[in-house]
Image (cartoon, grey):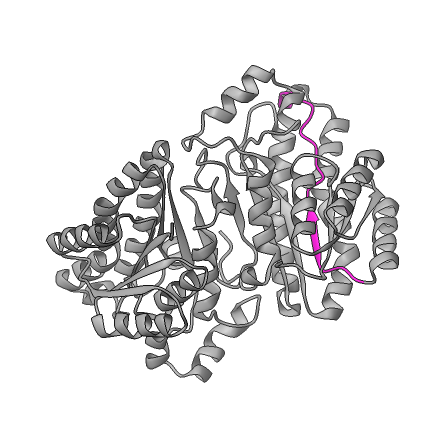
Amino acid sequence: MRLKGKIAIVTGGAQGIGRAVALGMGREGAKVVVADLQAEKAQSVANELKALGAQASAVEVNVANESSVKQMAKSTFERFGRADILVNVAGIYFPKASVVELSEEDWDRTIDINVGSNFLCCREFVPSMRAQKSGRIISLASGIGHYGMRQFSHYAASKAAVMGFVKALAREVGPDGITVNAICPGSANTSMPRQHRTEEEVMGRLRSTPLPHILEPEDIAGPILFLASDAAAYITGQSYNINSGSYMF
Amino acid sequence: MKQVAFIIGGGGGIGGAVAQRMAAAGISVVIADYDGAAAERVKSEITKAGGQAGALAIDVTVAREVKAVVRDVEKRHGRIDILANIAGGSAYTKRIEEFTWAQWKEVMDANLKGTFLMCREVAPIMQRQKSGRIINTASNYGVTGSALRTPYAAAKAGIITFTKSLALELAPDNVLANTVAPGPTDTPRVMQKESAEARQQRWWPNIPLGRTAVPQDLAEMYYFLTTPESAAITGQTFHVNGGVVMP
């Protein structure tokens, strides 16, 4: 068990990649806070973790809301007393709209949820990581943050911003023994791409990667567990692509 | 069945640590190095610790030698699951007008050509197996460039893009190819040239994590790229450098 006794917070932990990360952390011995806007689903992941023998709690959070994030941090410290690993998974990939048709509200919402959340969550957990001179922060970016995507300017900008944020924070907190990295998944077999694509389109895309390997949430969780472990102590400020070879940066 | 890893440059600082890490995980390692005695030393450390290892000498810049050695390793072990190309480096830091053509070729061959020749011989074996992991070694200089190291930076940049192309070519056969890009690492070779104090003064203030790497920091990444957890990763470059470069 690589994460025995560590306290891990996983935002967006109720489904998809976040759920796979939360369950993986639990299997590796971490105590997990499953934080999500969808409280019931978060609770059900926490129950799955308990069934695996891991300590877990579910917290309802809106990661783009300052007081809600503060509340999440407060309940984490009350329950577990510390925070060792923060995984920022919560995000949205909607709506599909060209730049000229995109509303200001949808722009703001995407930027706030996808990258503002990184700021708000890190701001709450960094001070305690600093005090203990150790910590791991891993944020979900996206290959789209590198290569862009038509009708997703808001999403592309938000994910590129995550990478910039990660690099800046890595420089800021490195001297305190905290590492900060990003993972850039390709299109994965989750509900997210199904919001604007048919099942056939989604599976077609998943099967069209160079490597004949459909990208599952567990494929993204594995590298995140590695980055959270002692083995990755010397890695910071990086954005690693996990995408069955669909994009090489 | 035990996995077989072929570790080129396995007698050196990073290569030796990679061999140790993989052997500790139960992988049978074949340690190849230009310096055959160095390969033997790493082998005996591993076997003493209960691991399985073989050692041989190789000059990766000589095509027929690479061909013969790979044929021999395949014959002896029946398979090659992992190829880690870690041989390389450069003895030169000098201005471009001072580089001779022979020196340029020496650096390009030791790094880029050696990687090509090894991959050319091992890839077909992995394609027949329908599985394999190739891990090549670049450097942060392959992305940032470095004054006084023009051939080395060019060779390392070449390795990054060579590996992407190789990854695309081998992906249909479930053979994965990735690059590890170390930053400043305290290997015996560099420590011979520079004292620990001088390295600390030169590097540490510029590294967000406040220290240079030890070979074990790199070994963990090479090992990760052999595990089921990295089954969806190919054609990528993994910088392990304490944050000194964030591409």
Q: Tell me: residue A98, above or below residue A122.
A: above
Q: Which residue is drawn at the image coordinates 22% and 60% (left, top)?
A: B110
Q: Which residue is drawn at the image coordinates 28% and 62% (left, top)?
A: B87
Q: How many marks?
A: 0
Q: Any magenta on residue A90?
A: yes
**Residue A150 visible in the snapshot:** yes
Main SS of the magenta part reads loop
Taking A84 as reference, is A37 left or right? right
Pick the residue in front: A232 or A120: A232
Q: Which residue is drawn at the image coordinates 44% and 36% (left, top)?
A: A245
Residue B112, horizontal then vertical, whole percent: 25, 53
For the view shown, which residue lies furthest in the front direction?
Answer: B1
Q: Tell me: residue B133, above or below residue B241.
A: above
Q: Start and end of the magenta stretch?
A: A82-99
Residue A154, horizontal then vertical, whole percent: 65, 31
Q: Tell me: residue A11, above or below residue A181.
A: above
Residue B66, horizontal then vertical, whole percent: 17, 54
Taking A169 as reference, is A219 left or right? left
